[in-house]
């Protein structure tokens, strides 16, 4: 499997507190993504990055910010967590190999905002 | 803009029966198309992908999908369902300089013994 890890795997936090989720890759890929998964919505893109310090918004970016100071790390921050941000968060990387373009996903972070 | 529509949020088939999960896409450029499977409380695993080579794509666990440009479809099939196929399946599209991967809302597959 491609080297992509997410931390933490589970987190419970209180409304109004800041939360940072980390995605780490060992593949030196340029593109990294943050998605959230909710029942009935599939996976929706929050933010993505196309290089160090280069990021852009996805379809559900309100309430989230990201940073990428190194190729291997992509951080997702909830500045002030709300109950609507309770979700499972997945990080992904995009690579191009012998079989063409591919996207590989981390194991996910289950976030509960109480 | 690109989008994916998965017809049927829930599909039930009997063990040994044909599995057909439908996916239609919208893309202004030649797409890359993917099917992912997610087992309960797990992450996403790639089943198969189309990246402009053969239109009939074979994947893992006996699944295959056919890219039909005229129908803008990429339906997933398996000739004979197994109990272990019970999972949620996601179709996704990217491509043409758009490096974002856009997902459908998923289809939950139930296998009836």
Image: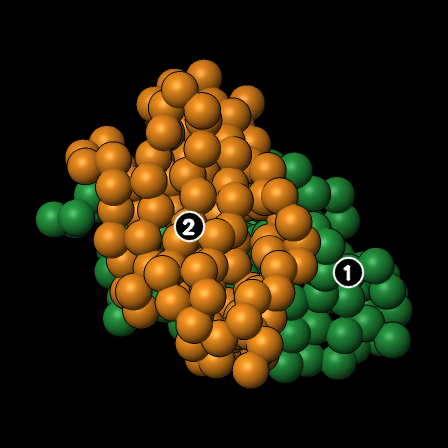
Chain colours: A green, B orange
Circle 2 residue:
B76
Please indicate whether residue A22 sits to the left or right of residue B56 in the image: right
Q: Is residue A26 left or right of residue A69?
A: left
Residue under pointer 1: A85
- Name which residue lies at 31% across and 53% down: B64
Q: In the image, residue B26 lies at what x, y percent?
A: 51, 25
| Residues tagged 1 and 2 counted as in contact (Cβ below 8 A) | no
Q: What is the C-alpha distance between the residues marked 1 and 2?
A: 32 Å
Closest to the observer, B110 or A7: B110
Residue at the image point whose x is 19% and y is 37% from the top: B54
Residue A86 locus on image (x, y percent): 77, 66
Quadrant in which residue A113 is drawn: bottom right
State the SS at label 2. strand
**The residue tagged with tag 1: helix, strand or loop?**
helix
Q: Chain of mark 2?
A: B
Q: Nearer the viewer, residue B52 or A75?
A: B52
Q: Quadrant of the C terminus of chain B?
A: bottom right
| Residue A54 visible here | no
Q: Nearer the viewer, residue A77 or A4?
A: A4
Q: Nearer the viewer, mark 1 or mark 2?
A: 2
């Amino acid at each position: 499997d491609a080297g992509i890890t997410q931390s933490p795997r589970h987190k419970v936090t209180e409304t109004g507190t800041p939360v940072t989720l980390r995605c780490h890759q060992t593949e030196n890929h340029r593109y990294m993504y943050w998605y959230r998964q909710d029942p009935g919505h599939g996976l929706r893109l929050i933010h993505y990055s196309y290089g160090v310090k280069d990021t852009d918004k996805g379809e559900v970016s309100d309430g989230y910010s990201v940073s990428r100071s190194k190729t291997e790390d992509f951080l997702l921050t909830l500045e002030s967590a709300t109950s609507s941000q309770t979700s499972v968060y997945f990080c992904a990387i995009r690579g191009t190999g012998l079989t063409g373009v591919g996207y590989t996903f981390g194991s996910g972070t289950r976030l509960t905002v109480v | 803009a690109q989008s994916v529509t998965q017809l049927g949020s829930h599909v039930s088939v009997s063990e040994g029966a044909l599995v057909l999960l439908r996916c239609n896409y919208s893309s202004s450029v030649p797409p890359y198309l993917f099917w992912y499977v997610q087992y309960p409380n797990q992450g996403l695993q790639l089943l198969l992908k189309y990246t402009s080579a053969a239109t009939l794509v074979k994947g893992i666990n006996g699944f295959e999908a056919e890219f039909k440009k005229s129908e803008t479809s990429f339906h997933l099939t398996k000739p004979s369902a197994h109990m272990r196929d019970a999972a949620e399946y996601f179709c996704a599209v990217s491509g043409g300089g758009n490096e974002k991967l856009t997902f459908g809302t998923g289809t939950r597959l139930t296998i009836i013994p």
